[in-house]
Amino acid sequence: MKAGRGEEAADEKFEASRGWFQRFKDRSQLHNIKVQSEAASADTESAERYPHELATIIEVGGYTKQQIFNVVETALYWKKMPSRTYIAKEEKSMPGFKAAKDRLTLLIGANAAGDCKLKPMLIYHAENPRALKNYGKASLPVCYKFNARAWMTEAYCKEKKIPFKILLLSDNDPGHPGALIGMCNPEINVVFLPANTTSLLQPMDQGVIANFKMYYERRTFAKTINAFNSDTQQHQKKIN
């Protein structure tokens, strides 16, 4: 901006109001994001080479977009409460709460065509948690065994009338190579992203994980509100 105005602006100090900055962000279509700590140490050279290497694997294997899947682990704090909320104008603050640290690990994935979302695999510290005492694991919206994922992809390929051969892309985490290769069906070719490139190459990091957790939180609160309303109605009936 100073260069455009010439020498007369060389010694001027630029100051902008909040409104000016907001309009500038809107015009420039800028948005605020959280910087991931691993991005600074990401291997950009390997990330730039990998798309060409992956294209070769896909071409040699003859994979279609429907046969290329990507999976990723993510931690889910399943008791987490929102960190922000709305309060009435006359209120200055709201009571705090102790953050629940109970977490579980989910493995989520989908194919490149976007028409097959895999049922998440759940990893929890207890094999039979008390909350699931009277529930059959087969009826849950998650998988406890990885071999069920092979069955899901096989059923999908049969429905789409395409050969059952899968290219599975995953992070190059130290615990992934041996575990995934050992548990996968022989028709599933597991390929790992280069080390230290997850923040640059992982497809599931492009909003999929964030949306998954957002919908989980929204559904959890909807069920909580419904349960609360149901209890309130039953209590009123007893009073009446």
Image: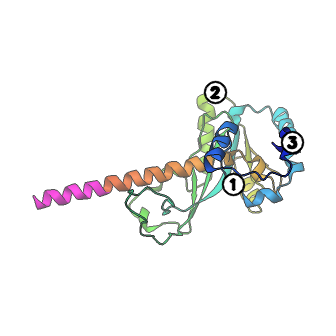
Q: Which residue is mark 1?
A: 183
Q: CA gap, disc 2 to disc 3?
A: 62 Å
Q: Is residue 214 magenta?
A: no
Q: Nearer the viewer, mark 2 or mark 3?
A: 3
Q: Looking at the image, is 124 positioned above or below residue 12?
A: below
- Of the pair 202 and 27, the residue shown nearer to us: 27
User: Outermost residue, top direction?
Assistant: 161
Q: Is residue 230 magenta?
A: yes
Whether residue 240 is visible, yes or no, is yes
Quadrant housing residue 97: bottom left
Dot 2 or dot 3: first in sequence order is: 3
Crowding at label 3, few (<14), some or many (≥20) Cα neighbours within 10 Å?
few
The disc at residue 3 is: 3
Q: Amino acid at mark 1?
A: Met
User: Outermost residue, bottom direction?
Assistant: 98
Q: Nearer the viewer, mark 1 or mark 3?
A: 3
Magenta residues (range): 228-240
Whether residue 207 is visible, yes or no, is no
The disc at residue 22 is: none
- The percent coordinates of residue 85 (x first, y second) are 46, 57
Crowding at label 2, few (<14), some or many (≥20) Cα neighbours within 10 Å?
few
Q: Looking at the image, is 158 positioned above or below residue 38?
A: above
Dot 1 or dot 3: first in sequence order is: 3
Secondary structure, mark 3, is helix
Q: Amino acid at mark 3?
A: Ala
Dot 1 or dot 2: first in sequence order is: 2
Crowding at label 1, few (<14), some or many (≥20) Cα neighbours within 10 Å?
few
Q: Which residue is mark 2?
A: 161
Say whether residue 104 is left or right of residue 44.
left
